[in-house]
Amino acid sequence: MLQNFHALFRNRDAMKKDIIVAGVGGQGILLISHIISNAAMHENLFVKQSFIKGLSQRRGEVFSQIRISDENVYSPIIPPCNVDLLIGLEPLEAARFVHNLSPDGHAIVNTEKIEIKNYPELDDYFPQERCHFIDAKKIADAVGLAKAENMALLGAASTFLPMRNETIMATMNKVVTKFIDKNIQAYELGKQEACAKKSADF
């Protein structure tokens, strides 16, 4: 029943993209969300966003919900089974939300795990045909900036966003205040990897 619940909230003639960005404190979830929201507004789209964090100083759960549409959005809360795009900066945190993907939804998930005892096996949590795993740490290491993992994942996720790539990158230039060149490199490499994976998957 929940799998059909999303249909109650959709206008089939409207463009809409419901997004969850999930991870742990310190991974830059808010920065990604800010870039996505501002890029959408620059293209005159309607945006609602909510941001929830737990013990972010202790690597606790952090996630945001972003709703983008060409029609007015009345609530920042995404209905069950209505997530069009899940951006998971940490795989365990992404697994908490993957059941809320819409039938056509996709997930971009970092392969880098936080270090905790008894980390669970997650292979069965993700629908393989709609989940795209990105080694964001490898990309960040390649550009020489450890904190660029979030921009690598944003680049990968941009292939599913309704905004133009030029708009997203222009927003990055305004919002990202440090190491912009390396962050853009990470973004571009993440986008390239996602494009290659999409071509292979589809």
Image (cartoon, grey):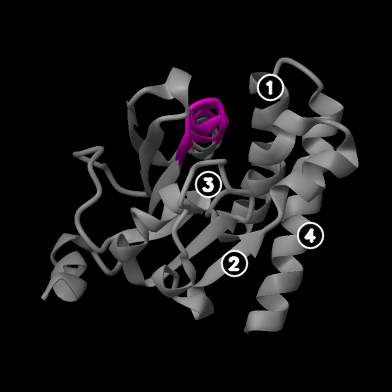
Q: Which residue is mark 4?
A: 192
Give the number of the mark in front: 1 or 2: 2
Distance from Cα at disc 4 to Cα at disc 1: 21 Å
Mark 1 secondary-structure assignment:
loop
Mark 2 secondary-structure assignment:
strand
Distance from Cα at disc 1 to Cα at disc 2: 25 Å
Q: Which residues are magenta?
A: 23-35
The residue that appears at 48% across and 53% down in the rendered structure is 119
Q: Is residue 101 left or right of residue 176?
A: left
Mark 4 secondary-structure assignment:
helix
The residue that appears at 66% across and 74% down in the rendered structure is 198
Distance from Cα at disc 4 to Cα at disc 3: 20 Å
Pointer 4 or 3: first along the chain: 3
Q: Is residue 202 left or right of residue 103?
A: right
Pointer 1 or 2: first along the chain: 2
Q: Residue lying furthest front in this view?
A: 117
- Badge 2 amino acid: His
Q: Which residue is mark 1?
A: 176
Q: Does residue 33 belong to the magenta stretch?
A: yes
Pointer 4 or 1: first along the chain: 1
Pointer 4 or 2: first along the chain: 2
- Badge 3 amino acid: Glu
Q: Which residue is mark 2?
A: 132
Q: Residues within 10 Å of mark 1 (few under 14, many from 20)?
A: some
Q: Quadrant of the N terminus?
A: bottom left
Q: Which residue is mark 3?
A: 90
